[in-house]
Image (cartoon, rainbow, N blue to C red):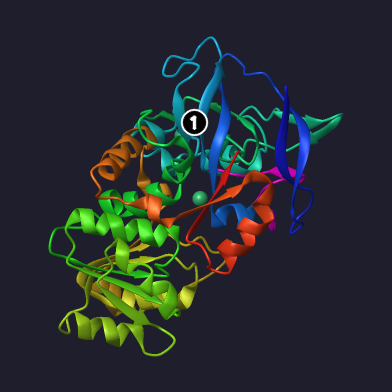
Amino acid sequence: MKIKAAVVREPSSPFVIEELELDEPRDNEILVRMVGTGLCSTDLTAQHGHLPVKFPGVFGHEGAGIVEKVGSQIKTVQPGDHVTMSYTSCGICNSCIKGHPTHCDHFFPFNFLLGGRPDGSPTMRKGDEIIFGGFFGQSSFATYALATERNTVKVPKDVPIEMLGPLGCALQTGAGGVFYSLEVKPGSSIAIFGGTGSVGVSAIMAAVVSGATKIIVVSRSDKKMKRTEQFGATHFVNSGKCDPVEEIKKITGGVGIDYSVECTARPEILRQAVDCLAMGGKCGLIGAAPMGTEVTFDMQTLLDGRSVMGIVEGDAVSGILIPKLIELYKQGRLPFDKMIEYYPFDQINQAVEDLQSGKVIKAVLKF
Ligand SMILES: [Zn+2]
Ligand SMILES: [Zn+2]
């Protein structure tokens, strides 16, 4: 079928809307008509070729829309259902069987490397030219996307579908990181480094839900930090004006923070996020640095029961977490609609500019 998609022809070139041919869904595939798709920093990392992706490619991994067609083996959704899409996984490796599909043995090939289906076949073409799709099992910067039951979640129809795409990555990552990876406890303290973007703001909202009483945002921009107050941040530390480790120790009465989250992907910030921990504290690394980036810690710091863990997609099973996040939203406890600015799909490059400049927390493209 004919679709319109935002194609990146080569690393660092802009998104160009082109007409492409998308395969009809196979027996195990779901065709989704896109209504809204979020723009995530990982899309931009891919755009610049800093992920192992192929060009020309179609990115986008926070798609939300309406099921148009399903293959013969599909049981969980039917045409007309509202769905969000997330990362994909194999379903049969040890991590998937143990309920940790974010650690799937095939996470990299299926979501990035292959540029098509898990069997390596392409899903999109322009004439005879292959356009690489299958990004996060969806490539949602397009009017239609092919997904599977591994990464499609049915959502209720009483919430606007165009705003639900970010649940598939930013919300899931920030909230899942707080709920599942760090297991933030009531009355605890948490510091979120680089906490002014959509993942950080999601972590702030989830920390409120978890009952954390000190929610510290660390950033170099007072203006961006101020914006997070409405989501529940309680303290702001401008790391450009003070030593954030000392400042966090001061705020926590000298003992350090129970939990920290690193969203900037910079080794010196990760070091600060570990150094500010209380004895036994946990640091979650969310920021994805380029391959080969190294970091150093004082071994004594870690010996005192502190730990660092990597967090991908909030260690969440999307089909379980996303419906819960929607319930929290409906109860007014996860007001993620307040972080979204909408752009028409063909304004994607403007959305990229506004996201990079920090003008918006989360850009969502509407179709
Ligand atoms: Zn797997
Ligand atoms: Zn993402």
Decide whether the magenta segment is chiefly helix, strand or loop: loop
Residue at 45% from the left image edge and 35% from the top image edge: 161
Pick the front one: 7 or 226: 226
Observer able to see residue 326: yes
Q: Would residue 154 appear left or right of 29 to someone viewing this image?
A: left
* Residue furthest top in the image: 72
Furthest-left residue in this view = 187
Residue sitting at x 37%, y 35%: 159
**269 or 41, which lies in front?**
41
Q: Residue at x 26, y 64 (%)?
A: 232
Look at the image and say whether residue 13 sits in the magenta stretch. no
Q: Check disc 1 and report the residue beneath it.
A: 90
Magenta region, residue range = 47-61
Establish if 345 lies above or below 93: below
Count of numbered circles on the image: 1
The amino acid sitting under disc 1 is Cys
Q: Quadrant of the N terminus?
A: top right
Label 1 CB less than 8 angstroms from ligand 1: yes
Q: Quadrant of the C terminus?
A: top right
Q: Is residue 213 left or right of residue 16?
A: left
